[in-house]
Image (tube, rainbow, N blue to C red):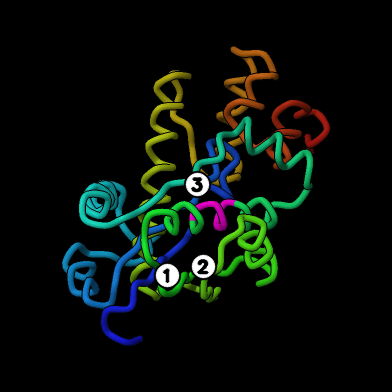
Amino acid sequence: MPRGRRILGVDESGKGDFFGPLVVGALLASDSDLEKLQELGVRDGKLIANKKLLTIDEQLRSYFPHIIIMFSPEEYNRQYASIKNLNKLLADGHARAIAAVLVKHRVDLAVSDKFGKTELVEGAIRKKGVTIDLQQLVRGERIPQVAAASILARAAFMREIEKLSALLEIDIPRGAGSIVDEAGRKLAKRHPVSLFGKIAKIHFKNYRRIVNPALFAK
């Protein structure tokens, strides 16, 4: 890429997690900033230890233009109930992030971590009434700006999970495995089922296993 081109990286966190929001992060940096990104330790957020990731996130937010788009569980569930398609919801999040940065900054290229058909994000961007050169790459985190966006998204998601854990007085786990079901059943004993619509993505199979565990007994 030519030196000085302003690249907007976009990535998300939380799409595979039953508990918590869906978060999309976007960060704008030019090629002349790549040395700074390397100095901060930027790489795919999934490969960075939590404490280090939060430190890098704070530094990125102080140095670079960025935006965080967060779908709370309530908003996520409302939108998913309408469109029944996670990739369309993700596309809207990526488009919202790109459009929000374009309002204030010149962007020469947006690079999004690819998660579905390319026309989904392209169409969502057109609906926002903006035009941008866009690339969607599998394993997009190999682009430093996308890796930085992945850090912003993951850190924001982690902070929300920490808040949720403190509020509910239980260690909220990530992912969608058996440990998540276990935490959900503990919560179901203490709270009404309606709580899950406010703290989790209820189209996940975890919800049915938590609410109707007998249906899944061996």
Residue at far right of view:
215
Q: Considering the image in quadrants, where does the N terminus appear?
A: bottom left
Numbered badge on residue 23: 3
Of helix, strand and loop, which one carries label 2?
strand
Give the residue type that dot 2 points to: Asp
Query: Dot 2: few (<14), some (14–19), or many (≥20) neighbours within 10 Å?
Result: many
Query: Residue 55 at x, y = what percent?
Result: 22, 49
User: Which element type, helix, strand or loop, lies under badge 3?
Assistant: strand
Tag 3: residue type?
Answer: Val
User: Does the magenta-highlighted stretch encompass residue 144?
Assistant: no
In the image, is residue 210 above or below residue 136?
A: above
Q: Are the residues tagged 2 and 1 within 8 Å (C-beta)? A: yes
In the image, taking residue 19 as reference, residue 166 lies left or right, namely left
Viewer-proximal residue, 43 or 80? 80
Res 141 label: 1
- Identify which amino acid the numbered label 1 is placed on: Glu
Which badge, 2 or 1, comes first in the chain's sequence?
Answer: 2
Residue drawn 32% across and 67% down? 43
Residue occupying the point 43% across, 47% down: 68
Image point (58%, 21%), residue name: 186
Q: Is residue 131 left or right of residue 45?
A: right
User: Which of marks 3 and 1 precedes in the sequence?
Assistant: 3
Residue stretch in magenta? 93-97
Work out how far the residue at label 3 is from the one at label 2, CA to CA, in angstroms.
13 Å
